[in-house]
Image: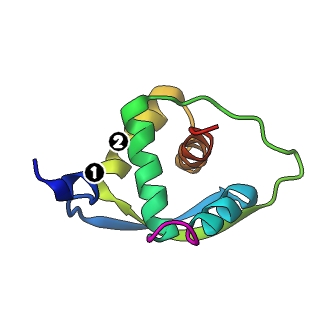
């Protein structure tokens, strides 16, 4: 393992997917692009990887008036395959799993 392994993801085939994201989560990711030298797409991929590693698939409470918007993402193929396994295991849709992943990383330091 070298230093770059600590900071960068290895290359993987990317799958283009349109995923509904809770607006409040997406806005927080937009704010983080001002802090980190990264894109929202890359943050979503990291969030998915963390969800897969942790297995923390707990539905969170969201505002009943939450607006949901569809966004285009390039999701790592290996991660998407793991999301499909989690979908089958927990009976939770891919878009909900992605929202849970984002929620988990945004709230991990609180």
Q: Is residue 19 something that shows in the picture? A: yes
Residue at x 62% of width, y 41% of height: 107
In the displayed structure image, the side of residue 6 where residue 15 appears, left or right: right
- On the picture, is 62 further left or further right than 73? right
Location of residue 34 (image quadrant) = bottom right
Q: Residue 62: image x %, image y %?
A: 79, 42
Q: Residue at x 48, y 57 (%)?
A: 44
Q: Is residue 28 above or below residue 50?
A: below
Circle 1 SS class: helix
What span is colored magenta in the figure?
33-37
Q: Mainly helix, strand or loop, the magenta region?
A: loop
Image height of 75 relative to 83, above or below: below
Asked if residue 17 shows in the view, the reply is no
Question: In terms of image quadrants, where is residue 104?
Answer: top right
Indicate yes or no whether the magenta region holds residue 57.
no
Residue 6, image x, y percentages: 25, 51
What residue is shown at x 74% (from left), y 57% (from top)? 24
Residue matched to label 2: 82
In the image: residue 61, left or right of residue 59: right
Under tag 2, what secondary structure? helix
State yes or no: discs 1 and 2 in contact (Cβ < 8 Å): yes
Badge 1: few (under 14), some or many (20 or more) residues near its Cα, within 10 Å? few
In the rendered image, the quadrant that contains the C terminus is top right
Q: Which residue is mark 1?
A: 78
């Amino acid at each position: 393992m070298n230093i770059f392994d600590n900071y960068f993801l290895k290359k993987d085939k990317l799958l283009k997917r349109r995923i509904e994201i809770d607006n409040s989560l997406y806005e927080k990711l937009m704010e983080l692009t001002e802090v980190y030298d990264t894109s929202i797409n890359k943050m979503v991929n990291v969030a998915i990887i963390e969800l897969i590693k942790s297995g923390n698939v707990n539905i969170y409470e969201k505002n009943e008036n939450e607006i949901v918007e569809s966004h285009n993402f390039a999701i790592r193929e290996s991660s998407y395959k793991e999301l499909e396994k989690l979908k089958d295991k927990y009976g939770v849709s891919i878009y909900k799993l992605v929202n849970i992943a984002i929620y988990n990383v945004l709230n991990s330091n609180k």
